[in-house]
Amino acid sequence: MRRRIHGTCRFERSGVHSTAMGLQNLGIALGVAVLAFFSGMLGFGVALAAVPFLSLFWDDLVHQVQPMSIALGGITALFAALGFGRSGYIEWRLGAQLALVAGLVSPIGVWLAHRTSPMLLWIFYLVSVGYLLYRMVHPRFASLDPRAVAPTKALLLVIPIAIYSTMLGVGVGFLLVPTLIALGMEPKRAAGTNALAVFAQSLTAFMYHLPTAQIDGRMLAITALAGVIGSYWGARFTSKRLGATQVRWVFALMMGVMMLYRAILLFL
């Protein structure tokens, strides 16, 4: 009798736990879809926004949050590249060169992430995103005239960008896109060309993370599907309904609120 009661209690607790985990996974997938929608507006992979969001559910930044964010960023970047390519917004030769360089050096960023304090990684992340948001909303950076991009400069700059962004667990886009624009590339073409580099960087970085990653393959598949759907409709919504200035402000406000919340949890 005691065994039966004990067994029943264990079954009920297991059922409650499974239900809670299912609801949590559903919440994560829906959250990633929303973040991918806003990220897709700018042609970014979802990793930049996924890092602080996933950290609300998982404690291990390097072995759980970063591998999942990098994988999601690479998958969404691949579909973004397909969309930009069909619209003629990719500089294929430069994009392939950037992808090769970013893919080769990204394992260095993973190696550094495994040997850097998580608190220090968060500080680097907060500072970097803060600078990105400043560039997005400041009018001075919206008035650059498109001109021919020097491939050598772009290839040299992508090396530290790929290493640094991989160390933070995000795609190169949040630094590479504004860099390409500053070098003279038209914004949509910069976003499309960047998508190739993000995919290659994410692929090699994820493979380097894989031996020590603590992620659920089923959860990765579900969130990847949600991310692909969200990023596709984000890009479609931007092309039909919003202008570039509105998109920048929407994304900046979303990321600003998320980063403020993450900073409060981190330091208080």
Image (cartoon, helix red, strand yellow):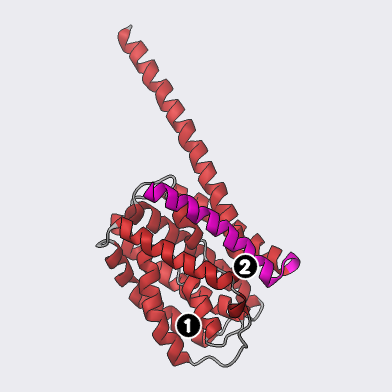
Q: Residue 96 carries which label?
A: 1
Q: What element carries label 2?
A: helix
* Quadrant in the picture for residue 5: top left
Q: Can residue 13 be seen in this view?
A: yes
Residue 63 x %, y %: 33, 54
Mark 2: which amino acid?
Answer: Arg
Q: Which tag, 2 or 1, sits closer to the chain's start?
A: 1
Main secondary structure found in the magenta portion = helix
Three-letter code, disc 1: Ala
Q: Residue placed at 48% from the left, 59% from the top?
A: 72
- Residue 240 vs residue 156: left or right? right
**Residue 206 position within the rendered picture, expressed as x and y whole percent measured from the top left:** 37, 63
Instruction: Tell me which segment is drawn in magenta.
Output: 240-268
Q: Check if residue 235 falls in the magenta segment.
A: no
Q: To which quarter of the image does residue 114 belong?
A: bottom left
What is the x, y in percent for residue 46?
Answer: 52, 61
At 30% across and 72% down in the image, what residue appears? 108
- Per the image, the residue denoted by label 2 is 248
What's the distance in space between the residues labelled 2 and 1, CA to CA? 27 Å
Where the N terminus falls, by quadrant?
A: top left
Is residue 67 toward the left or the right of residue 146 in the image?
left
Q: Which of marks 2 and 1 is in front?
A: 2
